[in-house]
Image (tube, rainbow, N blue to C red):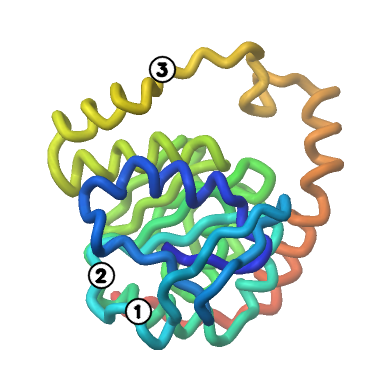
Amino acid sequence: MLLYPGMTALDVVGPQGLLAGLAPDTLDLVAQTVGPIPSDTGLSLIATTSFADCPTDLDVLFVPGGDGTAAQMLDAATLAFLRDRASRARWVTSVCTGSLILGAAGLLRGYRATSHWCVRDTVLPLLGAIPVDNRVVFDGNRVTAAGVSAGLDFALALAARLRDEDYARTAQLVAEYAPKPPFEAGSPAAAGSTITQRANAILDTLATEARKAAATTHWPASSDD
Protein backbone atom coordinates (compact mmCIF):
# COMPACT_ATOMS: atom_id res chain seq x y z
CA MET A 1 0.00 0.00 0.00
CA LEU A 2 1.56 3.27 -1.15
CA LEU A 3 1.98 6.12 1.32
CA TYR A 4 2.92 9.67 0.34
CA PRO A 5 2.72 13.15 1.89
CA GLY A 6 -0.80 14.52 1.63
CA MET A 7 -2.58 11.18 1.20
CA THR A 8 -6.02 10.78 2.75
CA ALA A 9 -5.57 8.53 5.78
CA LEU A 10 -9.00 6.90 5.48
CA ASP A 11 -8.18 5.84 1.91
CA VAL A 12 -5.46 3.67 3.43
CA VAL A 13 -6.75 2.75 6.86
CA GLY A 14 -10.20 1.55 5.76
CA PRO A 15 -8.95 -0.93 3.13
CA GLN A 16 -5.96 -1.92 5.26
CA GLY A 17 -8.23 -2.84 8.14
CA LEU A 18 -10.38 -5.09 5.98
CA LEU A 19 -7.59 -6.65 3.92
CA ALA A 20 -4.96 -7.18 6.62
CA GLY A 21 -6.45 -10.49 7.70
CA LEU A 22 -5.71 -11.98 4.28
CA ALA A 23 -1.96 -11.56 4.68
CA PRO A 24 -1.11 -10.08 8.08
CA ASP A 25 2.63 -10.60 7.71
CA THR A 26 3.01 -9.45 4.12
CA LEU A 27 0.95 -6.27 3.88
CA ASP A 28 3.53 -3.52 3.47
CA LEU A 29 3.03 0.23 3.87
CA VAL A 30 5.45 1.55 1.27
CA ALA A 31 6.94 4.99 0.66
CA GLN A 32 10.09 6.37 -0.91
CA THR A 33 11.68 6.18 2.55
CA VAL A 34 10.54 4.51 5.77
CA GLY A 35 9.13 6.51 8.65
CA PRO A 36 6.11 8.71 9.39
CA ILE A 37 4.28 10.11 6.36
CA PRO A 38 1.81 12.96 7.03
CA SER A 39 -1.69 12.71 5.64
CA ASP A 40 -3.69 15.65 4.29
CA THR A 41 -5.20 16.23 7.74
CA GLY A 42 -1.90 15.96 9.63
CA LEU A 43 -2.35 12.40 10.87
CA SER A 44 0.81 10.45 10.06
CA LEU A 45 1.01 6.82 8.99
CA ILE A 46 4.23 4.86 9.30
CA ALA A 47 5.86 3.56 6.14
CA THR A 48 7.49 0.26 7.03
CA THR A 49 9.09 -0.46 3.66
CA SER A 50 10.93 1.71 1.14
CA PHE A 51 10.57 1.55 -2.63
CA ALA A 52 13.96 -0.12 -2.80
CA ASP A 53 13.03 -2.85 -0.31
CA CYS A 54 9.47 -3.48 -1.48
CA PRO A 55 8.94 -6.99 -2.86
CA THR A 56 9.01 -7.05 -6.64
CA ASP A 57 6.11 -9.47 -7.18
CA LEU A 58 2.90 -8.31 -5.50
CA ASP A 59 -0.58 -9.75 -5.21
CA VAL A 60 -2.03 -6.25 -4.79
CA LEU A 61 -0.57 -2.85 -5.63
CA PHE A 62 -2.65 -0.15 -3.93
CA VAL A 63 -2.62 3.64 -4.34
CA PRO A 64 -4.67 6.04 -2.14
CA GLY A 65 -5.82 9.52 -3.04
CA GLY A 66 -5.58 12.82 -1.20
CA ASP A 67 -4.51 16.43 -1.45
CA GLY A 68 -1.01 15.30 -2.39
CA THR A 69 -2.23 13.57 -5.55
CA ALA A 70 -0.97 16.12 -8.07
CA ALA A 71 2.55 16.07 -6.65
CA GLN A 72 2.66 12.27 -6.97
CA MET A 73 1.37 12.47 -10.54
CA LEU A 74 4.57 14.35 -11.36
CA ASP A 75 6.97 12.45 -9.10
CA ALA A 76 9.36 10.42 -11.24
CA ALA A 77 10.35 7.99 -8.48
CA THR A 78 6.75 7.21 -7.56
CA LEU A 79 5.69 6.71 -11.16
CA ALA A 80 8.68 4.48 -11.92
CA PHE A 81 7.96 2.38 -8.82
CA LEU A 82 4.30 1.96 -9.79
CA ARG A 83 5.10 1.01 -13.38
CA ASP A 84 7.61 -1.58 -12.25
CA ARG A 85 5.46 -3.24 -9.61
CA ALA A 86 2.29 -3.04 -11.72
CA SER A 87 3.99 -4.99 -14.51
CA ARG A 88 3.95 -8.08 -12.29
CA ALA A 89 1.14 -7.42 -9.79
CA ARG A 90 -1.91 -9.63 -9.74
CA TRP A 91 -4.13 -6.62 -9.00
CA VAL A 92 -3.43 -2.92 -9.64
CA THR A 93 -5.76 -0.87 -7.48
CA SER A 94 -6.66 2.54 -6.10
CA VAL A 95 -9.12 4.46 -3.98
CA CYS A 96 -10.32 8.01 -4.62
CA THR A 97 -7.86 10.18 -6.57
CA GLY A 98 -5.27 7.44 -6.35
CA SER A 99 -6.54 6.41 -9.78
CA LEU A 100 -5.09 9.65 -11.17
CA ILE A 101 -1.65 8.59 -9.94
CA LEU A 102 -2.07 5.22 -11.64
CA GLY A 103 -3.19 7.08 -14.74
CA ALA A 104 -0.18 9.38 -14.64
CA ALA A 105 1.99 6.26 -14.62
CA GLY A 106 0.25 5.11 -17.80
CA LEU A 107 -1.48 2.24 -16.02
CA LEU A 108 -5.12 3.06 -16.83
CA ARG A 109 -4.86 3.75 -20.55
CA GLY A 110 -7.90 2.16 -22.19
CA TYR A 111 -9.27 0.87 -18.88
CA ARG A 112 -12.65 1.65 -17.36
CA ALA A 113 -12.01 3.39 -14.04
CA THR A 114 -13.50 5.62 -11.39
CA SER A 115 -12.23 8.24 -8.96
CA HIS A 116 -13.55 10.95 -6.67
CA TRP A 117 -16.47 12.68 -8.36
CA CYS A 118 -14.63 16.02 -8.44
CA VAL A 119 -12.09 14.65 -10.95
CA ARG A 120 -13.62 11.49 -12.40
CA ASP A 121 -15.11 12.92 -15.59
CA THR A 122 -12.63 15.77 -16.06
CA VAL A 123 -9.20 14.31 -15.30
CA LEU A 124 -9.38 10.55 -15.88
CA PRO A 125 -9.96 11.02 -19.65
CA LEU A 126 -6.83 13.18 -19.84
CA LEU A 127 -4.92 10.12 -18.64
CA GLY A 128 -6.40 7.73 -21.17
CA ALA A 129 -8.94 6.12 -18.84
CA ILE A 130 -12.66 5.63 -19.50
CA PRO A 131 -14.57 7.20 -16.57
CA VAL A 132 -17.33 5.16 -14.93
CA ASP A 133 -19.70 6.44 -12.25
CA ASN A 134 -19.60 3.43 -9.93
CA ARG A 135 -18.39 2.91 -6.37
CA VAL A 136 -15.99 0.18 -7.47
CA VAL A 137 -14.89 -0.64 -11.02
CA PHE A 138 -13.17 -3.86 -12.08
CA ASP A 139 -11.58 -3.96 -15.54
CA GLY A 140 -9.13 -6.77 -16.08
CA ASN A 141 -6.74 -6.65 -13.16
CA ARG A 142 -7.39 -2.95 -12.56
CA VAL A 143 -9.66 -2.12 -9.62
CA THR A 144 -10.52 1.49 -8.84
CA ALA A 145 -12.85 2.94 -6.23
CA ALA A 146 -14.65 6.26 -5.93
CA GLY A 147 -14.02 8.80 -3.18
CA VAL A 148 -12.71 7.99 0.30
CA SER A 149 -15.56 5.96 1.85
CA ALA A 150 -15.74 3.76 -1.25
CA GLY A 151 -12.49 2.23 -0.02
CA LEU A 152 -14.52 -0.02 2.27
CA ASP A 153 -16.64 -1.28 -0.63
CA PHE A 154 -13.44 -1.75 -2.64
CA ALA A 155 -11.76 -3.79 0.08
CA LEU A 156 -14.72 -6.12 0.51
CA ALA A 157 -15.12 -6.62 -3.24
CA LEU A 158 -11.41 -7.34 -3.62
CA ALA A 159 -11.37 -9.66 -0.61
CA ALA A 160 -14.07 -11.73 -2.29
CA ARG A 161 -11.82 -12.10 -5.35
CA LEU A 162 -8.69 -12.80 -3.31
CA ARG A 163 -10.36 -15.37 -1.05
CA ASP A 164 -14.11 -15.89 -1.43
CA GLU A 165 -17.44 -14.21 -0.72
CA ASP A 166 -17.89 -15.89 2.66
CA TYR A 167 -14.60 -14.39 3.83
CA ALA A 168 -15.67 -10.94 2.61
CA ARG A 169 -19.11 -11.25 4.20
CA THR A 170 -17.51 -12.25 7.50
CA ALA A 171 -15.15 -9.28 7.35
CA GLN A 172 -18.12 -7.01 6.65
CA LEU A 173 -19.99 -8.34 9.67
CA VAL A 174 -16.96 -8.09 11.97
CA ALA A 175 -16.62 -4.44 10.93
CA GLU A 176 -20.41 -4.00 11.30
CA TYR A 177 -20.39 -2.31 7.91
CA ALA A 178 -24.06 -1.57 7.27
CA PRO A 179 -23.99 2.14 6.39
CA LYS A 180 -27.05 4.26 7.01
CA PRO A 181 -25.73 7.82 6.71
CA PRO A 182 -27.65 10.51 8.59
CA PHE A 183 -27.96 12.61 5.43
CA GLU A 184 -28.55 11.89 1.75
CA ALA A 185 -25.59 13.94 0.57
CA GLY A 186 -23.05 11.39 -0.60
CA SER A 187 -23.15 12.42 -4.26
CA PRO A 188 -23.69 15.73 -6.07
CA ALA A 189 -27.06 14.53 -7.31
CA ALA A 190 -28.21 13.64 -3.81
CA ALA A 191 -26.67 16.68 -2.11
CA GLY A 192 -28.14 19.33 -4.38
CA SER A 193 -26.56 22.41 -5.91
CA THR A 194 -25.91 24.46 -2.78
CA ILE A 195 -24.04 21.72 -0.91
CA THR A 196 -22.23 20.70 -4.10
CA GLN A 197 -20.99 24.27 -4.56
CA ARG A 198 -19.65 24.27 -1.00
CA ALA A 199 -17.92 20.94 -1.57
CA ASN A 200 -16.44 22.17 -4.84
CA ALA A 201 -14.98 25.17 -3.04
CA ILE A 202 -13.17 22.79 -0.68
CA LEU A 203 -12.04 20.47 -3.46
CA ASP A 204 -11.17 23.10 -6.07
CA THR A 205 -7.43 23.23 -5.36
CA LEU A 206 -7.10 19.44 -5.53
CA ALA A 207 -9.08 19.24 -8.77
CA THR A 208 -7.28 22.17 -10.41
CA GLU A 209 -3.82 20.87 -9.52
CA ALA A 210 -4.74 17.40 -10.75
CA ARG A 211 -5.92 18.78 -14.09
CA LYS A 212 -2.68 20.71 -14.50
CA ALA A 213 -0.62 17.66 -13.61
CA ALA A 214 -2.55 15.48 -16.04
CA ALA A 215 -2.04 18.02 -18.82
CA THR A 216 1.72 17.96 -18.32
CA THR A 217 2.14 14.25 -17.67
CA HIS A 218 3.72 12.36 -20.55
CA TRP A 219 2.53 8.92 -19.61
CA PRO A 220 3.89 6.01 -21.63
CA ALA A 221 1.91 3.57 -23.66
CA SER A 222 0.35 0.76 -21.66
CA SER A 223 2.48 -2.36 -21.36
CA ASP A 224 -0.54 -4.20 -22.79
CA ASP A 225 -0.32 -2.24 -26.07
Residue 223 is situated, as x and y percent measured from the top left of the image, at 33, 79
Q: Residue at x 14, y 44 (%)?
A: 163
Report the disc number at residue 58: 2
User: How far across and down, in percent of the image, does residue 83 sit?
Assistant: 40, 79
Q: Are marks 3 and 2 in contact (CB under 8 Å)?
A: no
- Asked if 196 appears above or below 19 in the picture, the reply is above
**Mark 1–mark 2 contact, CB under 8 Å?**
yes
Count up the numbered dots.
3
Q: Residue at x 52, y 80 (%)?
A: 32
Where residue 54 sits, quadrant-wise, is bottom left
Identified at 38% across, 43% down, the residue is 17
Query: Can I make out residue 225 in this image?
Result: no
User: Please, what is the three-letter code of the amino acid marked with disc 2?
Assistant: Leu
Horizontal side, residue 163 vs residue 134: left or right? left
Tell me where residue 23 sits by quadrant: bottom left
Q: x and y percent of residue 30 in the render?
A: 44, 71
Q: 89 or 56: which is nearer to us? A: 56
Work out whether residue 135 or residue 50 is closer to the camera in this orientation and state it: 50
Q: Secondary structure at mark 1?
A: loop
Pointer 2: residues within 10 angstroms few (<14), some, or many (20+)? some
Q: Amino acid at mark 3?
A: Ala
Left or right: residue 212 compared with residue 75: right
Q: Position of residue 111 (x, y in %)?
A: 39, 58
The alpha-carbon separation of the residues under discs 3 and 2 comes to 31 Å
Position above or below: 153 against 111? above
User: As drawn, is 48 to the left or to the right of 139?
Assistant: right
Amino acid type at mark 1 = Cys
Residue pointed to by mark 3: 178
Q: Residues within 10 Å of mark 1 (few under 14, many from 20)?
A: some
Residue bearing the label numbered 1: 54
Which element is circle 2 on? loop
